[in-house]
Amino acid sequence: MANTYNIALIGGDGTGPEVAREARKAVEAAGARFNFKTHFVAYDFGGERYLKTGEVLPDSAVDELRRHDAILLGAIGHPDVKPGILEKGILLRLRFELDQYINLRPVKLYPGVACPLADKGPEDIDFVVVRENTEDMYCGMGGFSHRGTADEVAVQTAMYTRMGVERALRYAFEYTQRRRQPRPWKGLSAADKQAGKVGQLTLVGKTNVLTYVYDLWERAFHEIGEAAYPDVKRDYNHVDACCMWFVKNPEWYDVIVTGNMFGDIITDLGAMIQGGMGIAAGGNINPEGVSMFEPIGGSAPKYTGRNVINPLAAVCAGAMMLDTLGEREAAAAVEKAVMDVTAHCIKSLSAGRMGRSTTEVGDLVAERV
């Protein structure tokens, strides 16, 4: 009997509904090929709803979304709504209340995509960042004193719990094991390959300055790795060094695990070395609950309704959703179709320069699935 997945579809703002439509098309094509069904339920959460009703999310929204198998999001951000209202009221609220404690960001250069790094190709850029997604300075701990005066003080606290760190680390170790390639990962030494190690997990932190927070991360990293994941090679980078190596030697990386703030920063750098926001997708993951998948780029309101926006990041988010739901063959087929389109069918990832319309690019992916 075919599996049926109930998917909440939040098109959102600007070009979000356009790219979400093409992601849905690819997911449905994969379902037809791999014998599963998807039932999409559309929600109008976003700037237009807020401007009409003054409501960002209704009280019932979180519980209703929790009953779905996954959430597919287009984009959030409206030019007539003050920055932060929609982002905090929708994106951050859902991450926290649905306990989506992992932000998963693949960084992979596809064939035909221009890379800003000299002499680097698809064989050099293929790693994943696992970012803790619900703690750090995003918790909102802090405040002002004497606001608006010459003596003003602003404090925002980075907070981590052992539980929060451990569950992020365990997810990262297990993801590294699951990413086992048909051949041993090229970054391993001969001795590591002989020892049967499956890949490398790099902790990114700042132990020389943030001596409390990243001491906790580093201790837990090695304790968990030694006890439960001895087949995974462990490495460590300071976050500033990591940014340098992203540019100089991205081939050194397999899986990276890091905190919320550092992860927010390095994943945008990662998106640039994989060709830009037009191909970057991410997942907000609750391994025990409902997860949300989205393209990383914004709502691009100036392109709304022109059918010129690149939908491939949203399509890749759809592939991530399928992978997380357990439909891994289908996810791989969607990704392979995207790679064929980037290699042979479009001129650029930039809006209006693809040589194809948004709808045509989505059709090309669906046909190849």
Image: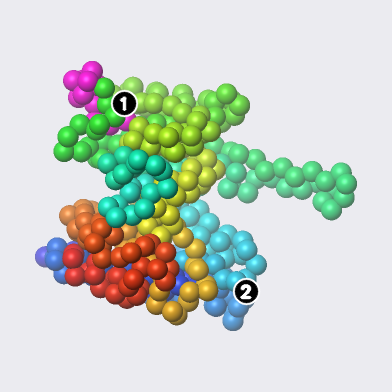
Residue in the picture at 54% in, 67% down: 77
Relative to 190, say whether 283 is above or below.
Answer: below
Residue 130, horizontal then vertical, whole percent: 40, 42
What are the residue bounds of the magenta stretch? 190-200
Q: Are marks 1 and 2 in contact (CB under 8 Å)?
A: no
On screen, residue 84 versus residue 72, left or right, reads right
Image quadrant in which you'd find residue 331: bottom left
Which residue has dot 1 on it?
A: 233
Image quadrant in which you'd find residue 330: bottom left
State the residue lying farthest toward the top: 191
Q: Nearer the viewer, residue 134 or 183?
A: 183
State the residue lying farthest toward the front: 118
Residue type highlighted by circle 2 = Asp
Residue 206, horizontal then vertical, whole percent: 54, 29
Residue in the picture at 21% in, 24% down: 193
Relative to 55, say whether 313 is above or below.
Answer: above
On screen, residue 306 versus residue 208, left or right, reads left
Give the Cα distance between marks 1 and 2: 48 Å
Relative to 126, say whether 217 is above or below.
Answer: above
Which residue has dot 2 on it?
A: 80
